Amino acid sequence: MILLVIDMQKALVDDELYGYETLVDGVVRLVDAARENNVEVIFVQHDAGPGSGFSAGDEGFELIDALRPAPGEKVFAKTINSCFGNKELKAYLKGQADKRLMIVGLQTNYCVDATVKSAFERGFTVIIPAGTNSTFDNAYMTAETTVRYYNEDVWEELVDAVTLDEALELLKKG
């Protein structure tokens, strides 16, 4: 199994996210558990391009302080919603014998959704721990409605939805 942490960057992680504290706490707990149990953690950062304030070298591009990669952990940048848009990451994941991806991060209705669907289409078993993906209010739905819509409806047949405690147990088993 691989724990894939998507876009937990300073420009995105703030208290306007739905379930902000639950999100950060849950993702940190999962990363810690993965490390303790020798489960690979991969971080992915969105690069919106030069001048966006959200690109390599910008403060907003950096991962939040609570989620600094450990030595040897892989970090990839992407320029489109799906993490599979990064050719190096796509090739790396394709080469893994274990086709289980635990996916957490931001934003539910953009990069997490695109990555979940891309992973499913490529034959991965996708595991989504409750409370570990989030987004902001938008013109059509509140953030809470958006998160619930994707987690409880859109992904219903694509993912193994688990509680945070179940996810922590899965990481203990590797």
Image (cartoon, grey):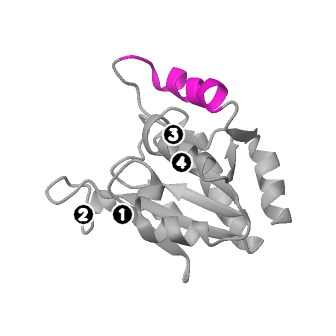
**Residue matched to label 1:** 62
Q: CA distance from mark 3 to mark 1?
A: 22 Å
Q: Position of residue 45 (x, y in %)?
A: 40, 60
Q: CA distance from mark 4 to mark 2?
A: 28 Å
Using the image, tell me which numbered label, if any, was put on residue 118: 4
Q: Secondary structure at mark 4?
A: helix
* For discs 3 and 2, the disc positioned in front in the rendered view: 3
What's the residue type where badge 1 is placed?
Glu
What's the residue type where badge 2 is placed?
Asp
Q: Are marks 2 and 1 in contact (CB under 8 Å)?
A: yes
* For discs 4 and 2, the disc positioned in front in the rendered view: 4
* Quarter of the figure with the C terminus: bottom right
What's the residue type where badge 3 is placed?
Asp
Residue at 28% x, 62% y: name it. Answer: 59
Please rate how many residues cluster around mark 2, counting C-alpha atoms within 10 Å: few if below 14, some from 14 to 19, many from 20: some
Q: CA distance from mark 3 to mark 4?
A: 9 Å
The stretch in magenta equals 140-155
Give the mark nearer the N terminus: 4 vs 1: 1
Using the image, tell me which numbered label, if any, was put on residue 58: 2
Q: Are marks 3 and 4 in contact (CB under 8 Å)?
A: no
